[in-house]
Image (cartoon, helix red, strand yellow):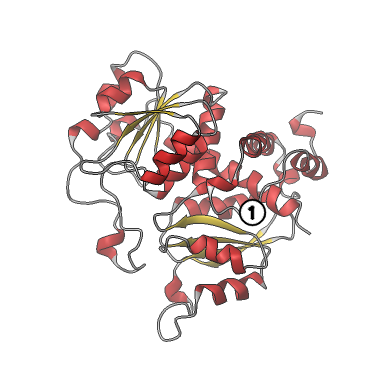
Amino acid sequence: MSEAQMTAGDLRGALADGPALPRSIVSMLDVTRPMLEHCFRMAALLEQAPRTSCAGVIAGRTMAVMFYQQSTRTRMSFEAAMLRVGGHVIGFADPATTRAVGFYEETLEDVVRFTAQMSDLLVLRHPETGSAARAAQCSPVPVVNAGDGYGEHPTQAMGDLYRIHKHFGRVDGLTVGIVGHLGWRAHRSLVMGLSLFGVRLLVLEPPGSSMPDDVAQLLRQRGTAVEMCGGIGEILARADLVTTLGVYHSNFHADFDDKANVASKQSTPTPDNYRITAQAVAQLGRPIAVLHIGPIADHIDRALDPMPQAHYFKQARDCVWLRCALLGLMLGRAP
């Protein structure tokens, strides 16, 4: 049967024909390579199947988004994914509209437990590292970590890995350049995911920073080859793909309304040896994929946007389909 002929029942059967995911997705340490590969297969299948069939995968289920911290792509990606597989979305995008701040200061645990009574799955973004684990511990329904302070962002990493696998047809054997601090949550989760495959990492840390000890220890344990680089030219010359968050970053611990701290851009310009320019990419004379989870500042030359090496817009699209698969796998098997 071709993908175009698949019914909602066929898709549910395909989702069930693989390893079960953890009840909650808090860390990339919860995820195995077989789980990731099944997610890749299911994301591709859902993307190719009729939209009417996709809309029956988890029809009637409700996802609650609980965003204590600003988001553009992650929140809309989850909401789009839930709608595509037939579910409903409730929740908040600003805690100022809830009793979690202000006079009442309702605890995270209470917001989680009450919201879980109205939904089948919670998606949480929170400025406090470890908040997703706290939520998963007390929640009667599954919890997905959409970013917890300087902890992790596991579904972003899963979507990035899906983009890489979809473009190259593999992850094993690739040389991956990473620009930015490996202690930032998206990079931390991506490196954890990449370490499940036979990759070589070329890392360009920001000035004055170094790889966190826990990340270095995990990479050693998993036998992942890592080289620290001194400039972007070194990475571009050798990598199959490069992903960057720049060298200046927002404060994940800042309050939601602290505009100075949560700003993604800073007035300090990115040093030239950390910037990816269209000219440098064009002069390589070979294919390279440039990824970025957004928002993009001056560390990527916007003349790169229309070039085939720019994958960040496709990356955002593929993250939606990966999350479709993830939600189908988590809720399709749930009682």
Name above or below for residue 208 compared with residue 309. below
Left or right: 140 as drawn, with respect to 26: right
Residue furthest to the bottom: 103
Percent across and percent down for residue 57 are 74, 49
Quarter of image, res 103: bottom left
Q: Residue at x 82, y 28 (%)?
A: 1
Quarter of image, res 4: top right
Secondary structure beneath dot 1 equals: helix
Left or right: 1 as drawn, with respect to 272: right
Name above or below for residue 133 compared with residue 241. below
Q: Amino acid at mark 1?
A: Leu
The residue beneath circle 1 is: 83
Residue furthest to the top: 285
Q: Residue at x 23, y 29 (%)?
A: 230
Percent across and percent down for residue 107 are 50, 77
Percent across and percent down for residue 292 are 39, 39
